[in-house]
């Protein structure tokens, strides 16, 4: 088995899983449709996956979704736009233009508008169908922008905003699924908004609520903004209770939804859906909140913060040390240029069209070679060529000697500049390698120092204990009358750590607090007043 086969067998499960995720996401997002039988979220998924195997998987998923969820008149422009988006990404593959974050969203939105615009212009009422087409175009670009961190090949990043947008766009496909008159999709959307607002605060809650609500209003085709207003207000109030208990955040979420539903009447399905979402939010296990505490303003403990900083510094030091070692292992091969290239290039310019070219470079090649070889040390020492540097048999025979000298001097200047550049580059490389090593040692020493600080972080309490045990002036402790001189002597032994440092033997274990206190009393008694 070759090296490539071993790598493929190792990464095959992960690759198949990634392709399967893109396939099923594109198929599922096709069910989320907007007025006009558009599926902008699925096209945004295809655009975000880009070229390659991931894009092919998303394109196949979009095709399966079109067969399952779209009628024939809506599937044709959808598939045409999906194929154009994928082929455009494949055509620009390898260019820097494709690496920009705006290429896929703008290309997807533009191609969708180009395809759908033809159908809008051919319809019976173009003006009435123009607004849904433009809104779907905007959703294609927005969804491609948010899906990129999750689905772009080789750059997957679990961005919280992208995960939230993906979850919301999938839940919108379940809006038409109802149980006892309650929409399953909007109930789960309320759960998602309550969780997001409670975890990330009021500003994120109101932004997520407005976006999800307006998307739900648009997908429903009713033409109102009921869900946008209700979800935005609910996210704001639930996020304002993020520092309290979950019960208050759930009540605030449902109360805001009820307040926004008053103009539409109590018969609106918004009230039971918000109640179901709030109830599901309260039923979530505590570990789903990642150890969230009631009070958010608490700062981490000092030793824990130092431990995290120490671990980060250690990782940075290890990375710099690895970079230093890699630069040492991969030492570049010496690329010192041969000075003969100066004469080769000068001969290409001058001698190729000369009448004596065959005589000098074929019949008398040995003499020409020796003449140029003998002149090389003088050229390199002086930095320029003169006619006296060449033997007389060569200088007398050459009929274009001034032109040849001019060409040699030009090529010699370029040769010396290239050699100087290579030497400076090598010196810079050695200097950078040494700086990486020094910086790694500095970070390692800093991390070790933070470990010592962490180990001694509790000594302040021991010092306070020793100071509290000190008798007042004029009082007795263990038969010793306390005096200012004794107090001055105790200032050097105010805690057990100092007493241990004074009494311990090399290699011995720490004495007990009673032994330390006895040592302290002996040191104090030696300074008693007569």
Image (cartoon, rainbow, N blue to C red):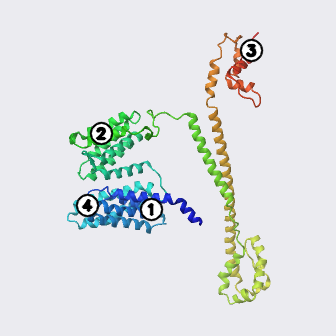
> Which tag, 1 or 4, sits closer to the chain's start?
1
Of marks 2 and 4, which one's residue comes earlier in the chain?
A: 4
Q: In 3D space, how far apart are the residues under numbered discs 4 and 3 (Cα atoms)?
A: 98 Å
Tell me whether circle 2 and circle 3 mark residues in contact (CB < 8 Å): no
Q: In this rendering, is residue 242 above or below 80? A: above
Q: Position of residue 505 (x, y in %)?
A: 77, 28
What separation in Å lies between label 1 and label 4 (alpha carbons)? 32 Å
> Could you tell me which residue is drawn at 34 percent across and 65 percent down?
81
Mark 4 secondary-structure assignment = helix
Helix, strand or loop at label 3? It is: helix
Whether 280 is drawn above or below 79: the answer is: above
On residue 525, which mark appears?
3
Q: Quadrant of the N terminus?
A: bottom right
Q: Earlier in the sequence, mark 4 or mark 3?
A: 4
Could you tell whether 427 is left or right of 150 in the image? right
Q: Considering depth in this image, is 142 or 392 the residue closer to the camera?
A: 142
| Figure quadrant of the C terminus | top right
Secondary structure of residue under mark 1: helix
Q: What residue is shown at x 32% (from left), y 41% (from top)?
A: 277
Judging by the rendered image, the residue that carries numbered circle 4 is: 130
Rate crowding at label 3 as few (under 14), some (14 to 19) or many (20 or more) other CA atoms within 10 Å.
some
State the image coordinates of residue 28 (x, y, percent, origin top left): 35, 56
Residue 142 x, y percent position in the rendering: 37, 55
Residue 154 seen: no
Does residue 260 sit above or below 343 in this rendering?
Answer: above
- Asked whether, in this view, residue 362 is left or right of residue 31, the answer is right
Report the Cα–Cα distance between label 2 and label 4: 37 Å
Q: Earlier in the sequence, mark 1 or mark 3?
A: 1
Mark closer to the observer (2, 4) = 2
């Amino acid at each position: 088995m070759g090296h490539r086969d071993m790598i493929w067998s190792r990464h095959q499960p992960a690759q198949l899983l990634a392709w399967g995720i893109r396939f099923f996401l594109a198929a599922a997002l096709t069910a989320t449709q907007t007025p006009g039988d558009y599926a902008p979220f699925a096209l945004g998924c295809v655009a975000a996956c880009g070229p390659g195997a991931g894009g092919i998987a998303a394109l196949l998923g979009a095709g399966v979704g079109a067969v399952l969820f779209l009628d024939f008149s809506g599937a044709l422009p959808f598939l045409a736009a999906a194929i154009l988006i994928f082929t455009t990404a494949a055509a620009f593959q390898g260019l820097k233009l494709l690496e920009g974050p705006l290429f896929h969203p703008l290309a997807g939105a533009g191609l969708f508008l180009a395809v759908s615009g033809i159908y809008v212009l051919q319809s019976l009422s173009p003006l009435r169908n123009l607004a849904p087409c433009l809104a779907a175009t905007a959703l294609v670009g927005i969804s491609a922008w948010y899906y990129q961190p999750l689905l772009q090949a080789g750059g997957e990043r679990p961005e919280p905003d992208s995960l939230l947008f993906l979850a919301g766009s999938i839940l919108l496909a379940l809006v038409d699924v109802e149980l006892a008159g309650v929409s399953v999709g909007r109930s789960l959307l309320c759960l998602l908004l309550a969780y997001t607002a409670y975890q990330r605060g009021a500003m994120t809650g109101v932004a997520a609520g407005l976006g999800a609500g307006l998307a739900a209003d648009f997908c429903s085709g009713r033409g109102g903004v009921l869900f946008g207003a209700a979800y935005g207000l609910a996210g704001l109030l639930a996020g304002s209770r993020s520092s309290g208990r979950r019960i208050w955040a759930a009540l605030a979420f449902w109360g805001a939804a009820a307040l926004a539903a008053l103009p539409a009447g109590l018969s609106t399905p918004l009230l039971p859906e918000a109640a179901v979402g709030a109830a599901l939010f309260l039923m979530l296990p505590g570990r789903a909140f990642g150890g969230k505490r009631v009070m958010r303003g608490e700062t981490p403990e000092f030793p824990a913060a130092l431990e995290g900083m120490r671990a980060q510094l250690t990782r940075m030091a290890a990375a710099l040390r690895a970079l230093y070692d890699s630069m040492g292992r991969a030492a570049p091969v010496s690329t010192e240029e041969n000075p003969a290239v100066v004469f080769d290039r000068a001969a290409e310019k001058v001698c190729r069209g000369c009448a004596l070219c065959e005589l000098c470079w074929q019949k008398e090649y040995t003499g020409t070679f020796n003449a140029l070889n003998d002149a090389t040390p003088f050229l390199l020492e002086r930095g320029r060529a003169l006619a006296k540097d060449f033997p007389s048999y060569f200088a007398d025979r050459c009929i274009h000697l001034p032109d040849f000298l001019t060409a040699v001097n030009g090529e010699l200047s370029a040769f010396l500049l290239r050699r100087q550049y290579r030497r400076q580059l090598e010196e810079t490389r050695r200097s950078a390698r040494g700086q990486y090593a020094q910086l790694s040692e500095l970070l390692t020493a800093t991390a070790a120092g933070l470990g010592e600080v962490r180990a001694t972080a509790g000594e302040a309490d021991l010092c306070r204990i020793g100071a509290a045990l000190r008798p007042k002036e004029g009082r007795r402790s263990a038969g010793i009358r306390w005096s200012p001189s004794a107090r001055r002597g105790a200032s050097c032994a105010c805690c057990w750590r100092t007493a241990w440092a004074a009494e311990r033997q090399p290699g011995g274990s720490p004495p007990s607090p009673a032994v330390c206190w006895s040592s302290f009393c002996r040191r104090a008694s030696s300074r008693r007043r007569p």
